[in-house]
Image: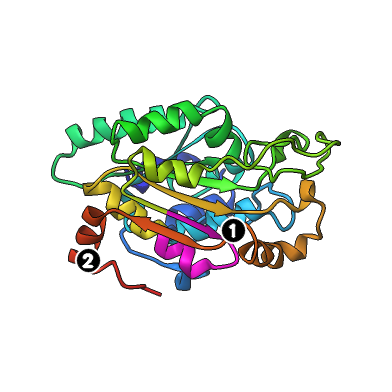
């Protein structure tokens, strides 16, 4: 799990685009970076194919800038909007079948613990609301019940953004969308509350409008998953294309959500608090 696997052989190096070379040469390897360091290193390509103003792309950038050990991290994804940036990031990344990312992440974590018993290898399942709350809900909950030491990150844009704007389980009740002309008929699935009761040692709910809170939550979640148990971070990452707002209003849309249904929340068990306190991560880093 290092940049060796993405470093091209000399014979093919000249054939690759400059952006790929930048990922290899200037990615966040062998260093601990943070939100304040964005722009000083290369975390994803600038030419990723997300829509203008995409909240998911912003959430991914903030999350990748908050990893405690990028060179020892693997992100497990699933088909959807999140794939586009994650597949073009300077991180070890693997895409699974839709919804089973937590199962794959569980197996990888167990394997890495056997293969590298003296080294922390962080495994993160980072996917959209459809992959976690809908098709992957069973796999997600059972990974928490089993106490798998992985971090789950939901990029919650409250819609199936990649397939035309259908409602997801995380869409707000009553919301009218391209493929929900009568409005969603049931409440937003309380995945954050499920995480607390299903065994997560740490959980946070945050939006892209609060990057330092997001960074702190992501860092704490990954560190806690190393020693204590499963963790969960739910990030509101609104979709301008399907929620029908101008692409330059993504952050303001997220700020509005912070005043209504996406108020910042953080939860940790006493074991997690003791662990984070012992390594100096309970106080806000930013």
* Whether residue 252 can be seen here: yes
Mark 1 or mark 2, which is nearer the start of the sequence? 1
- Residue 42 part of the magenta segment: no
Q: Quadrant of residue 189?
A: top right
Please identify the quadrant where the N terminus is shown. top left
- Residue 207 part of the magenta segment: yes
Q: Quadrant of residue 103?
A: top left
SS label for mark 2: helix
Residue 23 lies, in percent from the top left, at 48, 54
Please identify the quadrant where the C terminus is shown. bottom left
Indicate which label's residue lies in the foreground, 2 or 1.
1
**Residue 261 vs residue 53: left or right?**
left
Magenta segment boundaries in residue numbering: 204-217
Residue topped by disc 2: 277
Query: What's the mark number on residue 262?
Result: 1
* Above or below for 150 versus 56: above
Residue 225 lies, in percent from the top left, at 29, 47
Identify the residue at image location x=31%, y=72%.
283
* Observer-nearest of 284 and 269: 269
Residue 48 lies, in percent from the top left, at 64, 49
Labelled pair 2, 1 in contact (Cβ < 8 Å): no
Residue 206 lies, in percent from the top left, at 52, 59
């Amino acid at each position: 799990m290092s940049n060796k696997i993405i470093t091209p052989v000399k014979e093919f190096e000249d054939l690759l685009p400059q952006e790929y070379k930048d990922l290899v040469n200037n990615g966040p390897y062998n260093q601990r970076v943070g939100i304040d360091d964005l722009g000083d290193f290369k975390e994803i390509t600038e030419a990723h194919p997300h829509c203008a103003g995409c909240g998911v792309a912003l959430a991914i950038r903030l999350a990748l800038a908050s990893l405690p050990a990028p060179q020892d991290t693997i992100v497990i994804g699933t088909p959807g909007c999140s794939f586009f940036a994650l597949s073009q990031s300077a991180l070890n990344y693997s895409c699974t079948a839709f919804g089973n990312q937590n199962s794959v992440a569980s197996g990888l974590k167990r394997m890495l613990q056997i293969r590298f018993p003296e080294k922390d290898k962080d495994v993160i399942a980072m996917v959209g609301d459809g992959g976690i709350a809908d098709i992957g809900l069973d796999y997600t909950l059972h990974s928490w019940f089993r106490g798998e030491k992985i971090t789950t990150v939901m990029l919650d844009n409250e819609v199936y953004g990649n397939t035309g704007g259908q409602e997801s389980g995380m869409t707000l009740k009553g919301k009218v969308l391209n493929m929900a002309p009568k409005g969603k008929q049931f409440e937003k699935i309380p995945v954050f509350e499920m995480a607390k009761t299903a065994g997560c040692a740490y959980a946070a709910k945050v939006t892209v409008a609060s990057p330092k809170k997001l960074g702190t939550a992501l860092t704490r979640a990954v560190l806690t998953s190393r020693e204590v148990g499963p963790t969960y971070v739910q990030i509101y990452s609104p979709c301008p294309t399907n929620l029908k707002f101008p692409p330059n209003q993504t952050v303001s849309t997220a700020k509005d959500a912070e005043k209504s249904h996406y108020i910042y929340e953080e939860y940790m068990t006493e074991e997690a608090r003791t662990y984070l306190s012992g390594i100096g991560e309970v106080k806000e880093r930013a």
